[in-house]
Amino acid sequence: MDHRVTLLDLLREHLGLIGAKKGCDHGQCGACTVLVDGRPANSCLLLAVAHDGARVTTVEGLGGDGAGGLHPPQEAFMERDAVQCGYCTPGQLCSAAGLLAEAAADPGAAGLSRSGIAEAMSGNLCRCGAYPRIVDAVQDVAAMSQADPPVRAQAQAPGDGRVGGRVKPFAYVRATGLPEAIAAHGARPGLRYLGGGTDFVDLMKLGVEAPDTLVDLTGLPLDSVEETADGALRIGAGVRNTDLALHPLVRTRYPALSQALLAGASTQLRNVAATGGNLLQRTRCPYFQDLAKPCNKREPGTGCGARDGVRRDHAVLGHSPQCIATHPSDMAVALVALDAGVELQGPDGARTVPATAFHRLPGDQPERDTAPWTRFSGASSRTTSLPTTFPPTPTCPTSRCTGWTSTTSTSIRWAARASARSASSGRRRPSATPSTTRPAAGSANSR
């Protein structure tokens, strides 16, 4: 199978499972949501080759004992008239099934209040505005305690994949150890590392990133959260954003970090995005993402299109004549506030840098997002070394570890706003759909 094929294209074009829809194709609308190892994920941002052996459940694979073998959320959606045009419904159902299964397995991890359901389903947009009835349907199923999503069938078949867009061919390597991953950089020009991929795959589709080789790090043992002897916390770079946000020690000792992760992206993106990749994600500046526009960060020396263009959501402080773009990671802000450190691993060993020194201001080299890489082991590019863990973060009182973020209202709060409008107006359905503006904070990723 061609390495460029996404899981969504594999399902639709070669396995004939057309329930998952190709909407925005950039992980923003949720129409492509499927369950990967039981958790909702945007299949349009997942490379199929990177998920070999994963258990993938589409809407066709949901089954149950109800009429026609329907899964409980499917019956509830029909009963509550929550389907409307139906285009987004398969993704909504997979997200609902994942949420209900999570709640059944760990009641403390998933909230099934209206606001909790709204947050968990925030990555699925509905142009028809059926949000209040979708929330009603999920609550109905939760009340019946029928949350475990049975799988009727899992189709498995090889395929060449549908290849299109701007993604160029690349070699794919699954790293089996950290030394191997580090050594590969010098041996393979044009190499990039792949974590969750929710940011990087999107940039490949846009043509911003065009690697010759992708080294997949997801199989490395970097997915643990450990308490050290002195009471600090070490967080592996491979820990998924959802797992980190809901970890008991993070929620109790470092609520600001948990809140930042939950506010930074939809459930589908958090379930896939890796913590190390979250730190290394690229800016959401539209001029950076548009190859037809000048951008010093993407192509040094071409100019900054944003300075004389649309400047909303760009830097107020810390910018330079070369670049006014901002970094999209909410998590990075929390780590700086908590005086965290970032451990880097390179050819000459490991070193730790403060989170405050990890990222750099654009200055005269806006193409360099991170400062430590240029000073570590004689490295000439930021991809020479790998972030592995976040070592000691000092414990602080809960009252000093909480935070809040002021952002433009976006689609991530869809159901809460839609439900409030419906309740206040007494209408059966809301008359307006929520904004689909891409959040300035962007998707977390592994990016």
Image (cartoon, rainbow, N blue to C red):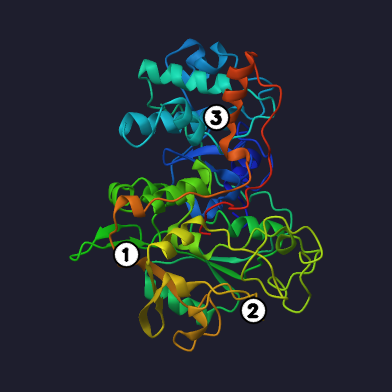
Alpha-carbon span between mark 2 and mark 1? 29 Å
> Which residue is pictured at 40% across the width and 52% down the height?
256
Q: Quadrant of residue 10?
A: top right
Question: Badge 3: how crowded within 10 Å, few (<14), some, or many (20+)?
Answer: some
Q: Is residue 52 visible?
A: no
Above/below status of 103 relative to 254: above
Above/below status of 15 relative to 349: above
Q: Amino acid at mark 1?
A: Thr
Residue linked to disc 1? 393
Alpha-carbon span between mark 3 and mark 2? 40 Å
Residue linked to disc 2? 363
Residue linked to disc 3? 416
Residue 55 x/y as whole percent: 43, 41
Residue 332 x/y as whole percent: 47, 61
Residue 154 x/y as whole percent: 47, 35
Q: Earlier in the sequence, mark 3 or mark 2?
A: 2
- Foreground pick, 58 / 349: 349
Q: Are marks 3 and 2 in contact (CB under 8 Å)?
A: no
Residue 425 x/y as whole percent: 64, 16
Secondary structure under tag 3 reads helix
Q: Amino acid at mark 2?
A: Gly
Question: Badge 2: how crowded within 10 Å, few (<14), some, or many (20+)?
Answer: some
